[in-house]
Image (cartoon, rainbow, N blue to C red):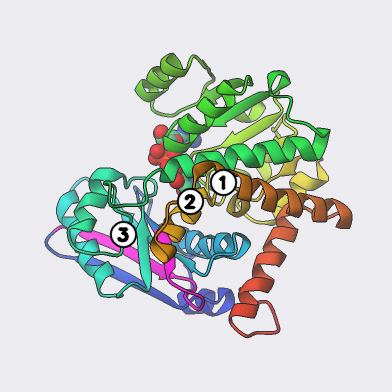
Amino acid sequence: MAIHLLEAMSREGFEEVVALHDRRSGLRAFLAIHDSTQGPAFGGLRRWSYLDEDQALRDCLRLSRSMTYKCALADLPAGGAKLVILDRPELDLAAAYRAIGAFIERFDGRFRAGPDVGTDAEELAWVAEQTRFVARPDADGPGLLAESTCAGVFAGIAACLRHLDGEEDWRRRTIVVQGLGAIGRGLARLLLQSGAKVRASELDPEKAERVARDLELELVDPASEYDQTCDVFAPCAMGGILHDLTLTRLRCRIVAGGANNVLVRSLHGERLHERGVLYAPDFAINSGALIRGALFHLEGRREGVERIGARIGEVLGGILARARAQDLAPVRVAVDEAAARIARWRGQSDPKA
Ligand code: NAD
């Protein structure tokens, strides 16, 4: 179904959505700024082969809004944005990222960009040639962004285990990680170092073999990860993976990972709760890179990765405790808390984030 953009913007409280086309590079992209009432809107640059522009726009809107939720829960004086690039073979990458840099500069700091799927150090360096408002990948940038996300997810998993069992007891745990990119790989390493057993799936066979060899972890076929009996399923690939068909297959007690927008709809969080699976809301657990990047840009300091992890574990622990006390799905509690804070920023009495 085609998206009714203005309707969606007004329903979800978006400030601005821009479609971007650059003739020279073939760039086609969308930028959504969800909120900049408290401070700059932070968001990554995602490059992906979307089926069509409707799918890209939907992804952009959802990711942008969840960045605001992350800022609200992490208590950062900042808001959320996202820029998605429609990847195509004919795209001139260097020219496209430079065009994005010039575009970002026009916002004069209201939008600040960082890495995301498809955008890493090389691409960020092209952007940084044209704008100050990007997380530089070199020594002048915040550094350790993926590491900060991994530390947060690891601490979040620990908080979930303590919530259910009173202790982490890593040696007794099996964790299934979906995706062995920057986050899945880093998380798997932390888990293995703690003594947990890790199984992982990865779509790219060459990457799968390489990481499995380096980390000495066991691989499972992509798409069979949902059926694995384990303590924790950690989605660290793309979003939109938990829906009516996949969530009935889960054989885990906890879902907690780095991927954004894991649930197709938030009602799937309620379904998991009904089935007795603890779901750690993605925007509560995967905000490590945002915290590191935002504090660097706003306060000029590099927050320690372990402190970031501790902060995320504490926030998530609080959400889980309140969810238990109210017998609600944690995602419901997290959405309500984020929406209430955003409404306060906007001077609204009725939370409508
Ligand atoms: P990445 O591109 O480095 O890695 C993603 C990996 O997942 C790739 O290796 C890809 O081949 C694999 N993959 C894709 N679909 C898969 C599937 N169905 N099954 C198995 N493997 C699959 O990206 P990343 O930086 O590791 O990010 C992973 C997720 O975490 C994304 O959803 C991203 O938005 C989210 N996230 C990342 C950060 C960060 O700091 N990098 C911060 C917050 C959230």
Within-10-Å neighbours for mark 3: few <14, some 14–19, many 20+: many
34 magenta-colored:
yes
* Residue occupied by mark 3: 134
Residue found at the far left of this picture: 24
Residue depicted at x 68% and y 62%: 335
* Residue occupied by mark 2: 303
Q: CA distance from mark 3 to mark 2?
A: 18 Å
Q: CA distance from mark 2 to mark 1?
A: 7 Å
Question: Can I make out residue 220 in this image?
Answer: yes
Which amino acid type corresponds to the residue marked 1 in the rendered image? Arg
Residue depicted at x 50% and y 55%: 291
Within-10-Å neighbours for mark 1: few <14, some 14–19, many 20+: some
Q: Position of residue 165 (x, y in %)?
A: 82, 33
* Residue occupied by mark 1: 307
309 or 110: which is nearer to us? 309
Q: Which residues are magenta?
A: 25-43
Q: Say whether residue 35 is left or right of residue 253.
A: left
252 or 53: which is nearer to us? 252
Circle 2/circle 1 CB separation < 8 Å: yes
Tell me which numbered mark, 1 or 3, is placed earlier along the sequence: 3
Q: Secondary structure at mark 3?
A: loop
Circle 1/circle 3 CB separation < 8 Å: no
Q: Position of residue 256 (x, y in %)?
A: 64, 40
Tell me which numbered mark, 3 or 2, is placed earlier along the sequence: 3
Instruction: State which mark lies toward you, 1 or 3.
Output: 1
Q: Position of residue 163 (x, y in %)?
A: 79, 40
- In this rendering, the answer to whether 222 lies above or below 337 is above
